[in-house]
Image: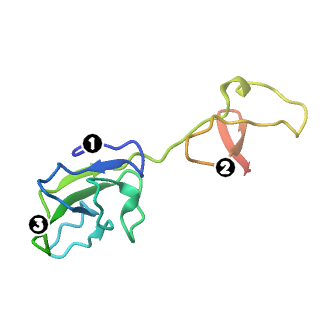
Amino acid sequence: TCGTTVSSLGATISASPALFAQQYEFRIRLTSDNGPEPTYYYTVPSASRFSSLSAFQGVTLQYSTSYTVSVRYMIMNGTTPVWSDFGPACAVTTPSFPVTEVTPSLCGLSTTGLDQTLTIVPYPGFPTYRVTLFEQVGEDLIPVGSI
């Protein structure tokens, strides 16, 4: 996922396997927060080298935003856990805010009643929608209201 725009805010990220690793911990920061003391957010350490962008504690990821991610791992030295340094960081960009549309078969239809049922093309993971109604006056679209 390094250097890519992921498909969702909960996209899976992964670390390369580390020999004898018992746990992995990811950290993330805004790429633009590159000062001397950036604000990092962390995942809970896990035995899995796979995590997701939604697993970071205390951060609300934003759409169309670049984040820098790195990972460290823990091995056992006898009975003592030893954590590595965080490895090389890479940038991951979140997707644009999703949009959808009114069901195409409804477009261009005239209605005589005010009780026309509108359906929209569903977008996975989004249970509610807002529809804004416009009235066309000449070349202008004038917002009438939202439902």
Q: Secondary structure at mark 2?
A: loop
Q: Amino acid at mark 3?
A: Ser
Q: Residues within 10 Å of mark 2 (few under 14, many from 20)?
A: few
| Cα–Cα span, label 1 and label 2 | 30 Å
Quarter of the rendering occupied by the N terminus: top left
Q: Which residue is mark 2?
A: 130
Question: Which of the two discs, 1 and 3, labels the residue nearer the N terminus?
Answer: 1
Question: Which of the two discs, 3 and 2, labels the residue nearer the N terminus?
Answer: 3
**Which residue appears at 85% of the width and 30% of the height?**
111
Please state which of residues 51 and 101 is positioned toward the viewer in this rendering: 51
| Cα–Cα span, label 1 and label 3 | 26 Å
Is 92 displayed left or right of 90 in the figure?
right
Where is residue 19 shown, x and y percent of the image? Answer: 11, 53
**Position of 104 relative to 55 (above/below):** above
Furthest-right residue in this view: 113
Q: Which residue is mark 1?
A: 4
**In front: label 1 or label 2:** 1
Q: Amino acid at mark 1?
A: Thr
Q: Quadrant of residue 22?
A: bottom left
Residue 96 badge: none
Q: Secondary structure at mark 3?
A: loop
| Cβ atoms under marks 1 and 3 closer than 8 Å | no
Q: Secondary structure at mark 1?
A: loop
Q: Which residue is mark 3?
A: 84
